[in-house]
Every structure is written in C-alpha cells, then in structure tokens.
C-alpha cells in the first residue's frame, strides 16, 4: 500500500508538520507478518514563500498562496502510483480564503481520500462550512480525535456518522525517569510547573502567572517554565508584544526567580525530558473552542499531572481522574488546585499514573496501526469510480500572477499611462482612467491573495483620484509628469470608471481610512450621476453604485439612482434594437461588455424583470457576434461594427477582453449557469493566444500585457490600461474558479 500524505512537514516548525511526520513514520514502520508493508511520500505545504531543507520522503512542495501548485500536485499524485491520499487539514495551512485552494487538488485526485481534521469550528462562517463540508464529501473516511468533533461533524456539517473514524492523537513512545530528568536540568530541588507549545495571547499564560504569588508563599520551590517560541503568525503581525507583556507581568509580581521563558522549538526527545521532569503540566487556554490539542495529548502520554481550563479536548481527555480542570481566566481557582496537588503527593502520583496508563494506548505505533487499518478498509471496499468532470476553468494555463510591470509603471504620483514596449513613457504622464483601474486591481489582488505589495500600491492610486477631483464633484483626467493639470474636466467615461473604483473600494476596503476617503469622494460626485449622457459612463457608474449598495443595501435614494440609470440604458436599447440587432447603439464600438455588465450588476440589486431580461438579451447578442469557434474575436476599434455593415477585425483592445470576462463572471453570479464560466475562460484566453492572430499578448518576460492586436501583429507597447485589463481578468478567473470549485 502506497500513501500520499498532504500537510506541513519538518523542518517547518508547525504542530501539524510534527503530526504528519509521526503519522507517516508510524504507518510505514507498522510492519506485521500478516500484512503488506506500507510505503509513502509527502507533499509538503510551504508558507509565505519560505522554503525548507526537507528529508527525502518529501517528493513535492506546494506554495501556500500559489493555486497552480495545488493542481500540479494533484497531477503528480495521480501519476505517482499512490493507492490512497491522506490529508492533514487545518484551515491556516492552505491558501485562498479559508483554505479553499485545497479543494481543486482534492477534486482532481483519482485515488481515495482519507482526511484527519485538526480543527472543527462550532460556529463556522459560510465559507468555512462550505470548505470543510466539501472536503468531507470527497473523503472516504474522516478521522477525528475527540467525541465532540463527531458531534460537530454530524450536527453542523451534515457528515454521515459511518464515514467518521475516532482515533486519538498519537504520542511518541518516549519515556524518561522524573528523577533523572530533573537532575539533567538541575531542578532536583524544584517543583516544576510546565506549559509548552507556540506562544500566543489565546494561550492564557498570564492566568498561571497571576496564580503563582499565593502558591509560592507556601511552596517557595515552585518554578514555572514556559517552553516554546512565539507563534509565527503572531510574530509576523504583532512581534513579541505578548511575550513582552508576560515578562513585564512577571517583573511586576516579583516572580523573576520563579518564572522562566525558554524561547525555543525543541525536538520530541527534549520535550519529553521536560515533561518527565515536570510535577504539573498546565494548559490555561482562554476559551473552549479547541477540538484537538497536541500539547495536551503529549502531556497525558508522558504521564504528566495536568491542570487545564475546560476546553473541548481537555474536558474529554482529563475525565475519570486523569487530570484537573479550572474555569477560564480563574487564577484563584488555579491557585487552589495547585496547592491542593502540591500538598498531596499521593494525589499527584495517582493522577500521573492514570494519565500514563491512558497514554500508553495512544502511542504512535498503535495509532499508526489504526490508520493503516482504516486505509486498508477503504481499499478493500467498493472501488472508487472517478468521474472526470469537464474542466470549465484550468488555472494551470495561467501564468503566475505578477505585479512586476505595474510596479515598474507606478511612482509616487500614480500609475504612468503609457509605455514604450515594457518601459514607462514618462512624457505622457498620468490619467484618471488608469489610476481608477489600478485601484480596482490592487484591491482585488489584496482581497484574493493578501498581497502586501498591492496594499502598498493602492493608496497611491486613491490619492491620485482624490487630487484630481474638482470642487463640484467632477474629475480632471490628465496630469503631466511634472504634476501640471492638462484639463479642467475629464471625459464622462473617466468619471464613470472612477465611480466604479470608488464603489468597489467601499465594498472591499482593507481598512476604515480607505473606506472613508472613498465614501467622501463618491458622495461628492453623486450629484453628477444623473447628468451623464454617455452610455458607457452611465454603465461604469452603475457598476460602482452596485458595489456600494452591496455593503449599504438600505440606501434607498442611491438605489433609486441606480434604477433611473438602468432605465436610461434600457431606453437606448429599446431605441436601437431590432429582431437581429439586440444592442444599445447602432454600432458595436469599444468596451462593449460593460453595457450588459452594468445591467447584470443592477439586476442583482434591483428585482426587476425588464432589467435582467435586457441584460441577458444584449449579452447573448454580443456573445453570438464575438465568440467564434470557441475563442473570443473582439470587435476592432479601427472601424468598429456598424449595424448592417462589416465588423472591424483589427485594433482589438485588452479592455474589451476584460469587459467580457467581467460580464460572464457576473452572469454566472446571477444565474449560476456554468456555461458562462466556459465563455469567461475563453474570453480570458484571448490574452494568451486564443485569438484571431493566435499570438499571446501577455509578455512572459516583462509581466506586462501588449496594447492590442493590429493588422501587422501585436502592438508590443505595454501601457497601464492593457496590463491592468489583463491582471483584473486574471484575478477574475481565479475568483470564478474558486467559486465554482466550492
């Protein structure tokens, strides 16, 4: 039996990684005469672009936020000869919102799946529930480590109980003498209290520290060791703030000689020496929401006398006299229990013996054998019938997402509008349209990828928009490189695109400062909304209003403006459409997909049959004209396409492809018809060579997008408009794929 394990793995310092290593080794080493041997390999998760010097059993790695890696891993596993895959699931180790990137990998597996769930949330968000439920649907067996987990899976996530296997958290088969361990650490004359694991504010270590003064008055030989590094995520975002707080608390309570912080990630043997040396082990977590605790399992397995707050796993594991519980945040109760145990060595010894005897049943050799038995049961059952699903979107065809060219085009004023090949053309300065698009792209990139670079870029684009707004709420458009205004009032189209960006910002603001800035400019501009005459400016503005209303649905005056603008578009449609020309004008010009897109957005906000019917009719007409033989053929801007005339083939623009991608994505959102995803992906592939010239507009060297398809070939200049159109389309494809895979 060959097994593919998916999870984190040492030397990455991660509790799940340690579990994966122990599970792998215990299953592979579970050699019995009457059983076939187990073999396997690891597909390891890397975090935040870090790499590790992995051992030989790691055959492939996945970068957490790189969706293409997950699909490559699925292909690798399917071709590896593995009989079964074992997934170690924890929300935080997989990419995408709530770890959704793992779903495409699992969907593509052609072998049975077994999953170990390390976290099961009692009150999950919609996305958390959707992700975990989908994983459980795909798994042949779901392994949990507590009875509370079974309760949650069956009542909250609707998992069939027959699919669930209860196997307790394994513990290393390591034993040390307490006397010898204390001697090695020079602690023969100390009563040792211990807490270990990654340090973070929810661990409640301050509760123990506050309990110590009373205990030390009676037992001055008490020493409390806090063993472990600060959690990597805490360190990344808050530094050592929590550890510093604890150290100040120790100093303030004059406990310097009784509390010691050992800031290390120790190996298992060293850890079990500390556990053996300890008299009492304490887990003072702040709340009940911990379904599994590896540190607690280790402590019980080592035969420690454990005192804990009553989180879910502790309540089960310490039952029947295997430990003692105290209330959350209750230092006084903890003090009483500590003194009771320290005053009664026989009671302490009895708890240690019960814990040790129980822990002997969970050592990894026995646990690995249980996992092997479950795996063999799966393979001995009904064969898995793999139904090949039609690939609607294939992210493996997408180049890696890169902001390199956008960074090249951006300075401290905003984004330069034009480029000579891949080099910014400073002579032509900046424009409002491109900074509005850039703001949308940056916000999308941060929302989907948590890309820190995009978050740093977005205030540049937002401040440009703010600088260009006139007192009457309109906007200038063009700014020279030396920051001189080049117009007094920009085009209606540039106004509409800006309202789109501000609406998107208010719906997806990364913080309140962004939201308030966007809101101020949006409402300063609002008196101009119903003065617009250009149908594309109306459409751009409608999209921005729709985004605003998604987060402010009770703003009825703005809803009414959206309705009025929708009917302005519909009046143009009714004036120009006929039996064979379902369109808003007597010609198809530029940014055509924006017009149906605006009505599709409006239809999501306003329940109005006429709006949705016009949106779908015009979209279907545009589809018939532009989707040819499975690929997108954009109406050329050279001569456009006049009613009863011939369509122009050349001067095809990337913004038109972007409009089509966005239009189909919104159509899918509204109707849930998966055929729109096929059309969305076909429209995106225009950038990568599925077009009339069969030439890629994406430049794999510069990471920019060429400016269009001309009669002579591809226009190799790579301005902001083109590259932003590509990147917004790229992000939309990934978002649509993620939504479909759910």
Image (cartoon, rainbow, N blue to C red):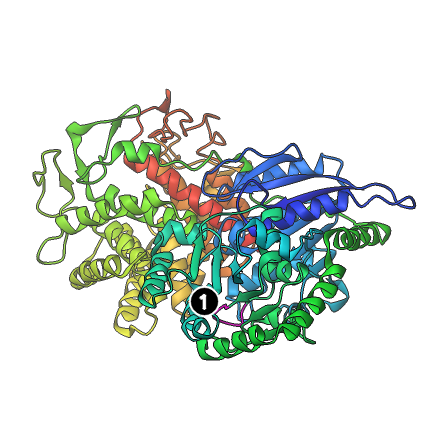
Where on the picture, by quarter, is residue 68? top right
Quarter in which the C terminus is drawn:
bottom right
Image point (57%, 66%), residue name:
280
Magenta segment includes 413? no
Please provide percent x and percent y for residue 1: 81, 42
Any part of residue 257 in sight: yes
Q: Secondary structure at mark 1?
A: loop
Question: Would you say the magenta stretch is mainly helix, strand or loop?
Answer: loop
Residue 188 to residue 287: above or below: above
Image position, residue 256 (x, y; %)? 37, 60
Q: Give the labeled residue for mark 1.
A: 204
Q: Give how far across and how far down residue 536 sits, in percent.
A: 28, 50
Q: Is residue 91 left or right of residue 459?
A: right
Q: Is residue 709 left or right of residue 15?
A: left
Q: Nearer the viewer, residue 436 or 513?
A: 513
For image coordinates 26% across by 33% down, the residue present is: 409
Please provide percent x and percent y for residue 126. Answer: 52, 65
Residue at 74% from the left image edge and 57% from the top image edge: 141
Quick check: is 286 in the magenta stretch? yes
Q: Is residue 597 above or below residue 420?
A: below
Give above or below for 211 relative to 705.
below
Q: Nearer the viewer, residue 80 or 384?
A: 80
Q: Is residue 121 left or right of residue 455?
A: right
- Front residue of 725/323: it is 323
Magenta range is 284-289
Question: What is the quadrant of residue 422 in the picture?
Answer: top left
Residue 579 visible in image: no
Left or right: 688 in relation to 407: right
Q: Residues within 10 Å of mark 1 (few under 14, many from 20)?
A: some
């Amino acid at each position: 039996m060959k097994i593919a394990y998916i999870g984190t793995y040492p030397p990455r310092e991660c509790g799940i990684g340690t579990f994966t290593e122990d599970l792998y080794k215990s299953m592979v080493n579970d050699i019995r005469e009457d059983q076939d041997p187990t073999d396997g390999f690891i597909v390891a998760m890397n975090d935040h672009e870090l790499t590790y010097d992995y051992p030989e059993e790691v055959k492939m790695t996945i970068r957490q936020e790189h969706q293409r890696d997950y699909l490559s891993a699925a292909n690798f596993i399917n071709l590896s000869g593995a009989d079964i895959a074992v997934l170690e699931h924890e929300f935080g180790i997989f990419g995408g919102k709530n770890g959704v990137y793992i779903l495409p990998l699992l969907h593509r597996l052609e072998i049975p799946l077994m999953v170990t769930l390390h976290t099961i949330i009692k009150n999950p968000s919609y996305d958390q529930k959707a992700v975990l439920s989908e994983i459980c649907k795909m798994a042949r067996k779901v392994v949990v480590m507590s009875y509370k987990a079974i309760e949650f899976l069956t009542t909250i996530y609707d998992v069939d109980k027959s699919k669930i296997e209860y196997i307790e958290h394994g513990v290393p088969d390591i034993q040390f003498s307490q006397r010898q361990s204390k001697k090695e650490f020079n602690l023969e004359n100390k009563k040792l209290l211990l807490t270990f694991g990654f340090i973070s504010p929810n661990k409640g270590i301050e509760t123990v520290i506050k309990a110590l003064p009373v205990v030390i008055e009676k037992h001055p030989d008490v020493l409390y060791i806090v063993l472990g590094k600060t959690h990597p995520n805490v360190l990344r975002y808050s530094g050592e703030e929590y550890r510093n707080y604890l150290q100040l608390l120790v100093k303030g309570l004059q406990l310097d000689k009784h509390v010691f912080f050992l800031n290390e990630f120790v190996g298992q043997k060293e850890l079990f020496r500390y556990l053996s040396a300890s008299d009492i082990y304490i887990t003072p977590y702040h709340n009940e929401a911990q379904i599994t605790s590896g540190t607690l399992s280790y402590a019980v397995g080592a035969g420690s006398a454990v005192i804990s707050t009553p989180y879910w796993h502790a309540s089960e594991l310490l039952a029947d006299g295997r430990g003692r519980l105290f209330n959350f945040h209750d230092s006084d109760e903890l003090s009483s229990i500590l003194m009771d145990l320290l005053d009664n060595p026989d009671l302490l010894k009895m708890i240690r013996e019960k814990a040790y005897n129980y822990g002997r049943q969970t050592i990894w050799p026995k646990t690995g054998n249980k996992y092997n038995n479950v795996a063999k049961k799966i393979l001995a059952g009904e064969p898995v019938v793999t139904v090949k699903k039609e690939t609607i979107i294939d992210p493996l065809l997408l180049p890696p997402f890169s902001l390199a060219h956008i960074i090249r085009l951006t300075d401290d004023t905003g984004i330069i509008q034009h480029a000579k090949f891949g080099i910014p053309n400073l002579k032509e300065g900046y424009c409002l349209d491109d900074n509005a698009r850039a703001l949308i792209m940056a916000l999308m990139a941060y929302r989907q990828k948590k890309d820190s670079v995009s978050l740093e870029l977005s205030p540049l684009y937002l401040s440009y928009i703010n600088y260009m707004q006139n007192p009457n709420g309109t906007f200038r458009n063009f700014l020279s490189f030396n920051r001189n205004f080049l117009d007094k009032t920009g085009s209606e189209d540039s106004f509409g695109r800006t309202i789109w960006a501000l609406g998107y910002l208010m719906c997806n603001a990364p913080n309140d400062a962004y939201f308030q800035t966007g809101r101020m400019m949006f409402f300063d501009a609002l008196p101009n909304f119903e003065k617009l005459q250009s149908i594309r400016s109306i459409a751009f503005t409608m999209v921005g209003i729709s985004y605003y209303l998604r987060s402010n649905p009770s703003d009825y005056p703005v809803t009414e403006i959206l309705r009025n603008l929708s009917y302005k578009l519909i009046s143009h449609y009714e004036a120009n459409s006929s039996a064979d020309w379902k369109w808003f004008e007597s010609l198809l010009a530029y940014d055509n997909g924006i017009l149906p897109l605006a009505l599709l957005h409006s239809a999501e906000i306003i329940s109005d049959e006429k709006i949705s019917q016009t949106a779908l009719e015009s979209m279907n007409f545009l589809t018939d004209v532009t989707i040819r033989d499975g690929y997108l053929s954009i109406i050329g801007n050279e001569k456009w396409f006049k009613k009863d005339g011939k369509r122009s083939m050349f001067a095809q623009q990337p913004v038109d492809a972007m409009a089509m991608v966005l239009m189909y994505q919104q159509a899918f959102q509204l109707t849930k018809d998966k055929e729109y995803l096929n059309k969305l992906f076909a429209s995106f592939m225009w950038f990568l060579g599925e077009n009339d010239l069969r030439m890629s507009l994406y430049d794999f060297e510069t990471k920019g997008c060429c400016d269009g398809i001309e009669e002579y070939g591809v226009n190799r200049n790579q301005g902001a408009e083109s590259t932003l159109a590509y990147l917004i389309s790229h992000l939309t494809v990934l978002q649509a794929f993620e939504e479909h895979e759910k």
